[in-house]
Image (tube, rainbow, N blue to C red):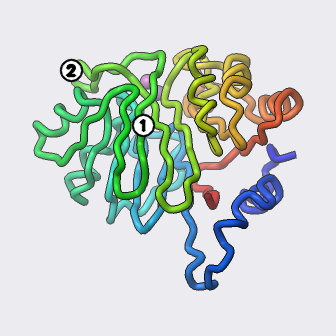
Amino acid sequence: MLFSNTPVLTIYADCLKGYHEDTLLGMGKEERIMASLTWLGHAAFMLETGGYKILVDPFITGNPAASFKPDDSRTDFILITHGHGDHVGDALKIAEKTGAVIISNDEICRWFEKKGLKVHGQHLGGGFHHPFGYVKMTFALHGSALPDGSCGGNPGGFLITLKENGKRIYLAGDTGLFGDMRLIGEEGVDIAALPIGDNYTMGPEDALRAVKLIQPGLVIPIHYNTFPLLHQDPITWGKDVETQTLTRVLVMAPGESITL
Ligand code: NI
Ligand code: MN
């Protein structure tokens, strides 16, 4: 059972036994600096891989769930799924400070470019080989207006294949359930982060159906309990997922990391 509040690395070691051992073969101990994914609360993640630091939907300031503030003094890339304030978050401030490249849909990238930032615009279904891995933008069933009301194009998610070890991570973004999640699953998803908060995104029941379509090795519930409106019980949800699917569940606390 993985949905306990025991230390996350213990949970990880248990649930993914043998999962990443191949990548360690032949490597010296000092070289075992592996990729990691840290949940910052809500939909925000910090991905560290291949010497790059990547922030996703960096909603830190004003996020009641962000008890952990990442060290953003060096950020290389910022991935933004859609234009809503709880996803654009601190991107502007962090990019201004660090020179990080914003990766998002083209409309959102043009918005940041006008503010003098470095951007790499993509669009739904399109992928690009960034230095840290191949990033494909996926469809999401949601809205995408930017904080000032500008058009933020279509909302999306990210399917990231790490250059470092080939691990594939699906960050769904804010979305309702859609049947083409099955197509995303066909690519072979190691880790999926799915919203379960309901109201603005999938709730627990639809997120369970999403797991059945995607069939990831591991699923991390996100976008819940940030505000009273998003109140959910991830433990109960995790039990349902593990009872009804082969996917393992990892309930993280903000600031916790897993090795990829
Ligand atoms: Ni949203
Ligand atoms: Mn949101």
Question: Callout 1: helix, strand or loop?
Answer: strand
The residues tagged by marks 2 and 1 sit, at their Cα atoms, a distance apart of: 24 Å
Q: Residue at x 26, y 50 (%)?
A: 101
Q: Nearer the viewer, residue 95 or 183?
A: 183
Disc ID at residue 58: none
Q: Residue at x 69, y 61 (%)?
A: 20
Q: Is mark 1 within 8 Å of ligand 1?
A: no
The residue that disc 1 covers is 136
- Quadrant holding the N terminus: top right
Q: Amino acid at mark 2?
A: Ser
* Residue contact between numbered discs 2 and 1, judged by CB atoms under 8 Å: no
Please tell me how many numbered marks the rendered image carries. Answer: 2
Q: Amino acid at mark 1?
A: Lys
Question: Callout 2: helix, strand or loop?
Answer: loop
For label 2, the crowd category at 10 Å Cα-Cα, with few meaning under 14, some 14 to 19 and many 20 or more, is few
Work out whether 9 lies above or below 244.
below
Q: Position of residue 67 (x, y in %)?
A: 54, 51
- Residue 99, picture quadrant: bottom left
- Quadrant holding the C terminus: bottom right
Q: Is residue 184 visible?
A: yes
- Residue 65, picture quadrant: top right
The residue that disc 2 covers is 150
For label 1, the crowd category at 10 Å Cα-Cα, with few meaning under 14, some 14 to 19 and many 20 or more, is many
